[in-house]
Amino acid sequence: MLTKNQLGFLYMFMSVVAFSIMDLIVKWSEYYPLGQVLFFRGFFGVVLYFFIMPRERIKNFYYTQRAGLHFLRCFFGLIALIAIFIALRNLPLATVVSISFAAPIFTTIFSIFFLSEKVGFYRWLAVLIGFVGIIVITEPGFNSLNIYYIYPIIFCLGLSYVAIAIRQLSTTEPVWLISLNFSLVITLVSLFTIPLGWIMPQIKDLILLCMIGLLGGIANLWLSQSFKLSEVSLVSPLKYLALVFGIIFGYLIWDEIPSIKTLLGALLVITSSLIILRREIYHKKKIPSNTRHE
């Protein structure tokens, strides 16, 4: 019989694997219009959350007294999702994963303005280390005017506000409702892209596209369950296994070999995130890590 910490460790590992496979499929889906891929991410997320919501809420699942904050969470979450999808299609997998680890850095900065939190010396040092890491990773891209390096940073900015919004929403709203509303918005927005030309997928491709939504939804559930069962300090470092999977998948499928600068920058960004995590635990103000691509 596994202990709670061991179960949480297992849930976190499964979540990282699911997110990594989802990233892999999103990168593979570059031949399909972005709006069409967003539809599969949103629609099958909706289907999943309808199965897990309380039975008594099926008829009034949409009820909330914080519609404005839900809208902001969905708006910035959609921007983050589109940005990471574009980045995955145009940059090496390990590079995108490395930069995406910088989200807690921006969350720390946003918490000053939106939550009136005080940020001490160590967290400011972590922010500085993280920004140096981002510069190290993206410097080749900026030198060669590769605009796609900006998209993972846009993702981090959007996700950082999402983390703040979820921290505020979760005081009164169930997690499934926050995620369901986001999946609904993705689905509705994606339908407006049909006139731009969707492609009829083959059966094999259809299965893979459906998996984007299912994996994203399941990964978020496993992530939430992990933080519910285990100590944050125990399971959070497992998130960085995503870089290992990114390197392996990128090399085996696309012959991508991460540069020394990418690995060095990733090390700085991960170090920065771990410092922030330790300070958050010290102050008992845990950053909500139950969202990533949503």
Image (tube, rainbow, N blue to C red):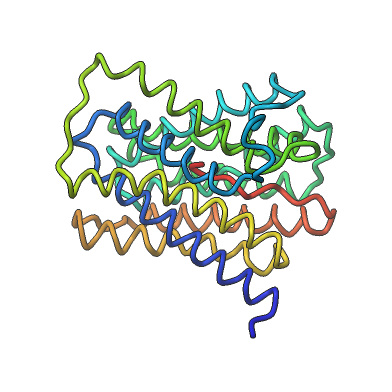
Determine whether, in the image, residue 176 is placed left or right of residue 174.
left
Q: Position of residue 9 (x, y in %)?
A: 60, 71
Residue placed at 24% from the left, 16% from the top? 196
Which residue in the rendered view is the most extreme toward the bottom?
1
Q: Quadrant of residue 246?
A: bottom left
**Relative to 143, 200 lies left or right:** left
Q: Residue at x 56, y 36 (%)?
A: 180
Instruction: Tell me where residue 42 sits by quadrant.
Output: top left
- What residue is at 24 percent from the left and 55 percent from the top? 256
Q: Is residue 43 above or below residue 3?
A: above
* The N terminus, quarter of image: bottom right
Q: Seen in the image, is 7 located left or right of residue 114?
A: left
Q: Quadrant of residue 223?
A: bottom right
236 or 195, which is in the foreground?
Answer: 195
- In the rendered view, tell whether residue 51 sits above or below residue 90: below
Mark count = 0
Of the pair 6 and 284, the residue shown nearer to us:
6
Residue at (45, 34) in percent of width and height: 81
Q: State the image coordinates of residue 148 (x, y, percent, origin top left).
A: 34, 32
Is 97 left or right of 103, judged from the image as shown? Answer: left
Q: Position of residue 158 (x, y in %)?
A: 55, 31
The image position of residue 17, as x and y in percent, is 43, 62
Q: Say which of 285 and 18 sits in front.
A: 18
